[in-house]
């Protein structure tokens, strides 16, 4: 549990430095015909890096293999970045602002943005399969976990539901299902992949999955709240886009105060899962759950 002498900010700075160095090294600028520049623009110099932090914190909690966790952390971020590149394109959400700067298709053109997203997705799985340093069985499990979270039963499936739901009234169960896939699957996978870099007891593995599911949904609830309470400069992306696009959100379904209460309930659920994990030190994971719910952008 968190203690007063725990320096989470210092922990996060150290982890983020590793992630940024890894991404800068592995997302090379020398891909042909300017593709490398578009890839690096999509990944570097922006973003909260929440997913990599969850991988590294979960690995640390189970005493896992740090080398595998850093690769997994960067791989998850590459999948996240590719999804944003494609999601922002005119055929999907048609957005012009991401992480406080023009979206990739605005800066580089639609064709280059499409290819940059494709290349980032492929690179994610390349990172998970190094020649040495990570046991083959661990490589295979990490690839499977990431593929499941990114595909039709995860993020891509959730995005398809999201696009099909414009202008429709969804029940809370339907909205939860959509966001558990679209946003929650990759956040949950980040935690589970971090745990898969070690050999935790079954009870710990299940508790971490429950924690990941809770914060995955909480992240989207908070996103919906911020979309109607913050401006574009604060968010680094276009504020009010969901309402303008007539998309169902937790705020439109529940109201602002109830949505905030729901996020707090999910934060409590995440903390309860950590308490039930039996793991000796889950302080970083606990702080990340708080950060997800209490963020302002």
Image: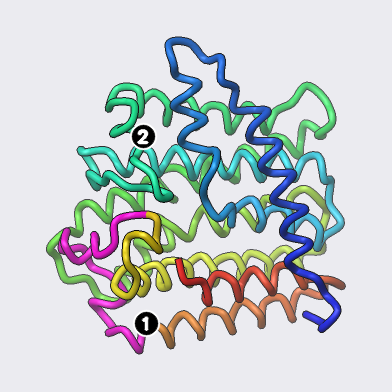
Q: Residue at x 78, y 63 (%)?
A: 10
Q: Quadrant of residue 273?
A: bottom right
Disc 1 secondary structure class? helix
Disc 2 secondary structure class? helix
Q: Quadrant of residue 96?
A: top left
In this picture, residue 180 sits left or right of residue 2: left
Q: Position of residue 71 (x, y in %)?
A: 70, 38
Contact? badges 2 and 1 (CB < 8 Å): no
The label on residue 106 is none
Mark 2 Cα within 10 Å, few/some/many (few <14, many 20+)?
A: many
Q: Position of residue 172 (x, y in %)?
A: 30, 76
The label on residue 104 is 2
Quadrant in which the C terminus is drawn: bottom left
Q: Height in image: 215 above or below 198?
A: below
Q: Height in image: 256 above or below 232?
A: below
Q: Residue at x 81, y 58 (%)?
A: 60
Q: Which residues are magenta?
A: 237-258
Q: Position of residue 188 (x, y in %)?
A: 57, 59
Within the magenta stretch, is there residue 253?
yes
The label on residue 259 is 1
In this picture, residue 110 sits left or right of residue 4: left
In three-dimensional space, the C-alpha distance between marks 2 and 1, rounded to whole angstroms, equals: 31 Å
Q: So how many labels did they put on this image?
A: 2
């Amino acid at each position: 549990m968190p203690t007063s002498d725990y320096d989470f900010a210092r922990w996060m700075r150290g982890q983020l430095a590793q992630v940024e160095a890894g991404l800068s090294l592995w997302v090379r600028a020398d891909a042909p015909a300017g593709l490398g520049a578009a890839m690096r623009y999509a990944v570097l110099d922006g973003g909260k890096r929440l997913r990599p932090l969850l991988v590294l914190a979960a690995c640390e909690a189970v005493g896992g293999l740090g080398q595998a966790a850093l690769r997994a952390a960067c791989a998850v971020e590459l999948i996240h970045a590719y999804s944003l590149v494609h999601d922002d394109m005119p055929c999907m959400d048609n957005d012009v602002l991401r992480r406080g700067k023009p979206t990739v298709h605005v800066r580089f053109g639609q064709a280059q943005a499409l290819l940059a997203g494709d290349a980032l997705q492929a690179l994610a799985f390349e990172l998970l399969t190094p020649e040495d340093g990570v046991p083959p069985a661990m490589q295979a499990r990490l690839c499977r976990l990431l593929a499941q979270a990114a595909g039709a039963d995860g993020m891509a499936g959730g995005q398809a539901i999201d696009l099909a739901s414009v202008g429709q009234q969804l029940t809370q169960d339907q909205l939860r299902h959509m966001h558990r896939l679209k946003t929650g699957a990759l956040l949950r996978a980040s935690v589970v992949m971090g745990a898969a870099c070690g050999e935790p007891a079954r009870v710990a593995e299940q508790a971490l999955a429950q924690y990941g599911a809770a914060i995955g949904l909480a992240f989207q609830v908070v996103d919906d709240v911020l979309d109607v309470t913050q401006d574009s400069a604060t968010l680094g992306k276009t504020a009010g886009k969901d309402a303008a696009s007539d998309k169902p959100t937790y705020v439109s379904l529940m109201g602002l105060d109830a949505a905030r209460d729901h996020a707090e309930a999910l934060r409590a659920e995440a903390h309860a899962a950590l308490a039930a994990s039996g793991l000796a030190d889950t302080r970083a994971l606990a702080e990340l759950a708080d950060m997800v719910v209490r963020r302002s952008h």
